[in-house]
Amino acid sequence: MKNLWKDIDNVKELISRKSFIILFLDFDGTISPIVSSPEKAKINPKIKELLKEFSKSSKVSPVIISGRSLEDLQQKISSKVVSLAANHGLEWVLDGKYEHVSLKPQYLHSLKSVKLLAKNLKKLFPKIIIEDKKLSIALHYRSLDNRQTVNLKSQFKEIIKKYTDTNLLEVIYGKKVFDIRPAISWTKGNLAKLIVSNITANKGKNSLIICIGDDETDEDMFKKFEKEITIRVGKKNDSKSKYYVSSVYEIVKFLQLIMKSSMV
């Protein structure tokens, strides 16, 4: 992993050489600072303006690719401005058309059961937040202290074991969140590949893929696009990304650079 700014001249040159850029951006921790509860999150205002500018460009196609539900993302930013990929790749809107991964009934029944069990956990840990995303469930525990967190993790593992052992559900352990989703072979990386195929079919092959994220599910994208520009927010030695930056504010700076370099 390199510090992005130490190789920025090469990155700028690559951006200016390509005829089209497909820009994948995670939401929380990437274009929105991490906050105490998910509903408080807002896109950095400078990034929001840059996304609007990109949407008018013939050279940059921005895609927000997040673990949030599609409904949630649409409240944060319009799908008329950017393409939206939600639920860690389980649903998306591309060119105004909604699509989702088809899930067998047993997966949906399992999610419903786990949601009821999670509500029981909330009686023991009132500060946790349960987010029903229809195709997945998120259990946020950012407000718990260390002792409560240890207890929650122990009880959560007992609850979820029945479903993970039978390959019905899987858990993505994010930053102070358990993301519970169907145990299927479909990730952010798979969806990003599909989106790239759709876009390049119309825009041509001389495209550059840029992936930016801060969490474990973004590693799936980094693996799929190892020959492209991949950036992690926050240094992580075993990350598959080529580069890292330190904060959302550095993402603002980088997106401004893309705007300037891609218009040359």
Image (spheres, rainbow, N blue to C red):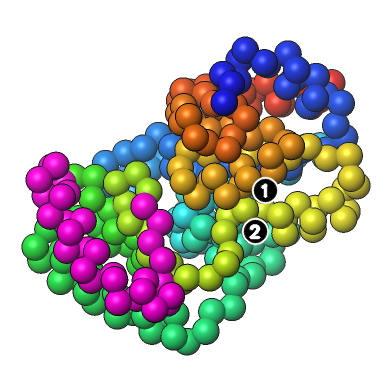
Q: At which x and y percent is residue 52?
A: 64, 38
Earlier in the chain: of badge 2 and badge 1, it is 2
Is residue 263 shown left or right of residue 47? Answer: right
> Image quadrant for the N terminus?
top right
> Image quadrant for the C terminus?
top right
Q: Which residue is mark 1?
A: 224
Tag 2, which secondary structure? helix
Q: Any magenta on residue 43?
A: no
Q: Which residue is mark 2?
A: 190
Q: At which x and y percent is residue 234?
A: 45, 28
- The quadrant in which residue 34 appears is top left
The foreground one among 205 and 46 is 205
Magenta stretch: helix, strand or loop mostly: helix
Q: Any magenta on residue 170?
A: yes
- The quadrant in which residue 10 appears is top right
Please name the amino acid that badge 2 sits on. Answer: Asn
The foreground one among 142 and 243 is 243
The residue stretch that appears in magenta: 144-173
Residue visible at 68% across and 16% down in the picture = 8
